[in-house]
Image (tube, rainbow, N blue to C red):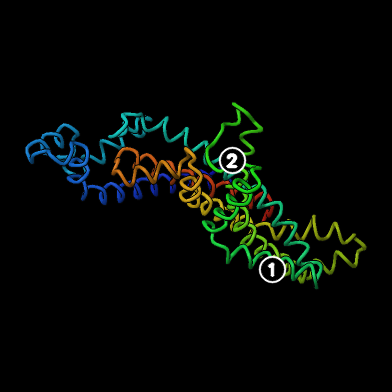
Amino acid sequence: MVLYALRRLAIGSILAVLVTLITYVLLSGSFDSIVHGIVGPAATPETIAERKSDMGLDRPVLVQYVDWLSRAVRGDFGVSYFTSEPVGPAVSTRLGVTLSIVVVALIITAVVSAALGVLAATRSGAIDRMAQGVSLTGTLLPNLLLAIILVYVLAIELKLLPATGFTHFREDPARWAATITIPVIVLVVNGIANLSAQVRGAMIDELRKDYIRTLRTRGISTRSVVLRHALRNAAGPALTVLSLEFITMLGGALIIENVFAMPGFGSYAFTAAVQGDVPVIMGITLFAVMLVVGINLTVDLVNGWLNPKARIH
């Protein structure tokens, strides 16, 4: 398992290099426009060329990328073109805001989806139809529309929750919970729709297998059969979907954080992309790739712990 983890980390590192290289090459085509935006519309071509040289953007693209990568490996991601803020600390701070929302949403999604999926798989009839109805509703309801509805009802009409902004947990836990409630609900609804259907399908497949019938004939309680055996074996596919939901939620943060004016990873990425802030875009790209690699590796290791047959030594 250790060798497997090391191999996955090596593959993840190669993936990070490839993704950031492609990103940098694509960005290089707009360097002139970016520099023009920095120096202002009245700048002469000579001024633009001089500024581009000062920023090191007149060198060959591969040389620029290798220089960026060598500094990034040492933890130096450069500074923002527009705010002069160090990219590493800025991305880390904003990523913490996003993760405080996404992790809470992911935990709620996992717990509720597991409960709905197990109930739907073990009890046909009204409960199964209700679970499938919840899944269908969550799939069809767009996140942006749901966010607008919740803000109007909970924040504007009932005045129960703040409509925008973010408070850090260390500053005021109660206020933090209030500020993330609506964004978490928005992310959870769609997550439950996808994951509960996966849990239901996997549980139905497991409950039809021969070893389940054998366990029942030995007098083992239904609760033990379902929770200790069937659910454990069905958890592998569900965890894979859960890891995809995590990535989807990170992407959803791009919309959610802009809607709720939250200083998170998604809103920072959106602003950087609009401005053409190359150091910020590169830092965000690298952080995002390594986060995805870390999540996928964690899921694989947990699958190996849940199912010894899946372990790779």
Q: Which residue is mark 1?
A: 133
Tell me if residue 204 can be seen: yes
Q: Amino acid at mark 1?
A: Gly
SS class, disc 1: helix
Q: Residues within 10 Å of mark 2 (few under 14, many from 20)?
A: some
Where residue 168 sits: x, y (%)?
57, 31
Residue at the extreme right of the image, as rendered: 219
**Which residue is pictured at 28% across the width and 46% down the height?**
24
Is residue 127 rendered to the left or right of residue 297?
Answer: right
Circle 2 or circle 1, nearest the eye? 2
What is the quadrant of residue 224 in the picture?
A: bottom right
**Which residue is pictured at 36% across the width and 29% down the height?**
86
Q: Which residue is mark 2?
A: 162
Where residue 249 sits: x, y (%)?
53, 51
User: In this picture, is 96 found above or below 5?
Assistant: above
**Which residue is pictured at 68% across the width and 53% down the height?**
308
SS class, disc 2: loop
Name the residue nearer the viewer: 313 or 138.
Answer: 138
User: In this picture, is 34 found above or below 310?
Assistant: above
Is residue 210 rendered to the left or right of residue 22?
Answer: right
User: In this picture, is 278 found above or below 206?
Assistant: above
Q: Amino acid at mark 2?
A: Pro
What is the quadrant of residue 227 in the picture?
A: bottom right
Where residue 294 sits: x, y (%)?
51, 44
Name the residue nearer the viewer: 53 or 300.
Answer: 53
User: In this picture, is 309 found above or below 277?
Assistant: below
Marks 2 and 1, the one that precedes in the sequence: 1
